Image (cartoon, rainbow, N blue to C red):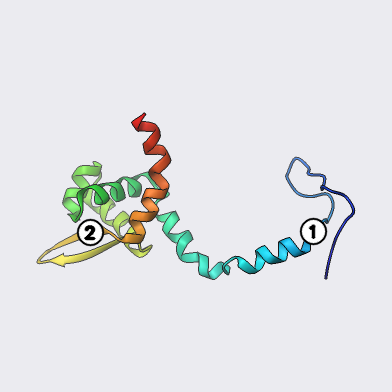
Amino acid sequence: MTFACSLEYAVVTVDETCDLLCIDVPKAEALRRTLPALDQLQAAADSAKALSDPTRLRLALALRDGGELCVCDLAWISERQDKLVSHHLRQLRGAGVARSRKDGRMVLYSLTARGRELLDAVTAQQLAAVAR
């Protein structure tokens, strides 16, 4: 089904919805075909969501700058209780932002390559503003 209108623009209301159904079908369809399916975007959304909490963001920054760290170190660095830090690290790990490995009785955490890329993208502008 093709919709078109003779107006060069659509009237936009305060709630930013079009008053007219006026679609540039070739452009809209071409864009729709290039976008990944929603289920394919879920992992990216989960990773971004993992860094949406200030404590998790702080933990990720500590892992980026400190390399492999245990929960005790991260609790001290983040000034949070170790149980809360463990909870946040599980979320980071579950989203593919961090990984863990056992070394005897200790569990060491580090950022994944994907986590580092996402962290850099999320913090680049903010950290550049602080540096000025």
Q: Secondary structure at mark 2?
A: strand
Q: Nearer the viewer, residue 87 or 44?
A: 44
Which quarter of the rendering shows the C terminus? top left
* Residue 112 pos. (x, y %): 30, 61
Which quarter of the rendering shows the N terminus? bottom right
Residue 20 higher or lower than 3, as above or below: above
Answer few, some or many: residues within 10 Å of disc 2's Cα (few below 14, many 20 plus, some between 14 and 19): many
Residue 93 higher or lower than 71, as above or below: below
Residue 38 at least partly seen: yes
> Which amino acid type is shown beneath numbered disc 2?
Tyr
Left or right, 22 with reference to 65 = right
Residue 54 appears in which quarter of the rendering? top left
Q: Nearer the viewer, residue 81 or 107?
A: 107
Residue at which label 2 appears: 109
Rendered residue at 19%/56% (across/down): 68
Q: Residue furthest right?
A: 6
- Residue 71: which numbered mark, if any? none
* Residue 35 pos. (x, y %): 60, 65
* Residue 62 pos. (x, y %): 25, 47
> Which amino acid type is shown beneath numbered disc 1?
Ile
Q: How many marks?
A: 2
Q: Nearer the viewer, residue 117 or 46?
A: 117
Rendered residue at 19%/44% (across/down): 76
Residue at which label 1 appears: 23
Q: Secondary structure at mark 1?
A: loop
* Residue 115 pos. (x, y %): 35, 57
